[in-house]
Image (spheres, rainbow, N blue to C red):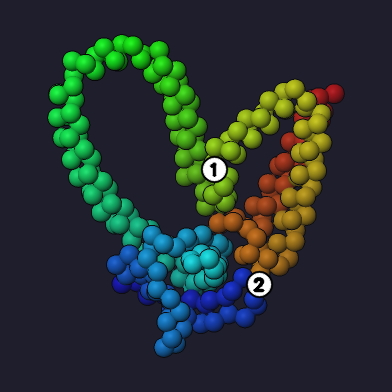
């Protein structure tokens, strides 16, 4: 069991409540004094890391958990989730083994008729294969990006819709570089202003910034976007 001292704070509140957070047997429990705030399965809650702790989302509500031993809690949480992942993979492997046996019996029974059907449907399978390969490439790219930048960006950034938007923006960059340069200049300036606001108010930073993103990251990203817009504007002339 992992027990950690923490402070609870609702989003938007300034005052915090001393509490104790426990991790045991795939469950997360929060207690304030002798009163139990709640107990949830790790599969039912969403924990998003912030600079001072974690943002807990459960049952439609969000709570900021500020931890004194953030590194220790993160290590314990990762260990618990990894352990549950091994159990889940073992069950999935057993289920796939049963499916393979069933599929093997069915395949042996209908192998003769399946050969003719496979030959007739080969063109359709080829087209479907290209589509599946394209989607697999997109999903693989998004998964790699999520592993690398997931702690700093919200989850919706790693979806197929955002990939399509980024691809469209790349095409627009080639066709209309001047328009894209103007957009980058405006976006960079707004990001710098946003970073300055969150830098001056830690409460707004914990509320608005996703994952491990800090106001410094927002400022640097805004400067990078602004410089990219300036460079693109010079090249477009």
Residue 158 is tagged as 1
**What residue is shown at x 53% (from left), y 46% (from top)?**
149
Furthest residue in direction right, as rendered:
237
Q: How would you rate the neighbour count of disc 1 (Cα within 10 Å): few for under 14, some for 14-19, many for 20 or more?
A: some
State the separation of the CA atoms marked 1 and 2.
27 Å
* Percent x, y of residue 70: 47, 67
- Residue 173 visible to an observer of this rendering: yes
- The quarter holding residue 12 reads bottom right
**Where 184 sits versus 17, above or below?**
above
* Percent x, y of residue 189: 79, 47
**Where 120 sits versus 33, above or below?**
above
Q: How would you rate the neighbour count of disc 2 (Cα within 10 Å): few for under 14, some for 14-19, many for 20 or more?
A: few
- The quarter holding residue 136 reads top left
**Circle 2 residue:** 12
Secondary structure beneath label 2 = loop
* Percent x, y of residue 11: 61, 70
């Amino acid at each position: 069991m992992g027990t950690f001292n923490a402070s609870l704070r609702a989003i938007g509140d300034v005052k915090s409540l001393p509490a104790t957070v426990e991790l045991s047997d795939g469950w997360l429990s929060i207690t304030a004094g002798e009163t139990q705030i709640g107990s949830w399965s790790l599969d039912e809650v969403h924990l998003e890391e912030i600079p001072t702790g974690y943002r807990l989302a459960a049952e439609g509500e969000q709570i900021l958990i500020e931890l004194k031993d953030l590194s220790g809690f993160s290590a314990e949480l990762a260990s618990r989730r990894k352990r549950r992942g091994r159990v889940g993979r073992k069950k999935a492997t057993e289920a796939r083994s049963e499916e393979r046996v069933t599929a093997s019996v069915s395949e042996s029974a209908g192998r003769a008729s399946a050969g003719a059907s496979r030959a007739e449907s080969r063109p359709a399978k080829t087209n479907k294969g290209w589509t599946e390969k394209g989607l697999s490439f997109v999903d693989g790219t998004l998964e790699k990006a999520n592993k690398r930048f997931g702690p700093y960006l919200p989850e919706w950034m790693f979806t197929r819709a955002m990939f399509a938007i980024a691809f469209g923006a790349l095409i627009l960059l080639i066709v209309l570089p001047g328009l894209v340069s103007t957009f980058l200049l405006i976006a960079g300036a707004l990001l710098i202003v946003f970073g300055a606001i969150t830098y001056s108010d830690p409460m707004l930073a914990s509320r608005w910034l996703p994952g491990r993103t800090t106001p410094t990251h927002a400022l640097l990203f805004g400067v990078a976007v602004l410089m990219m817009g300036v460079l693109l504007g010079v090249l477009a002339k």
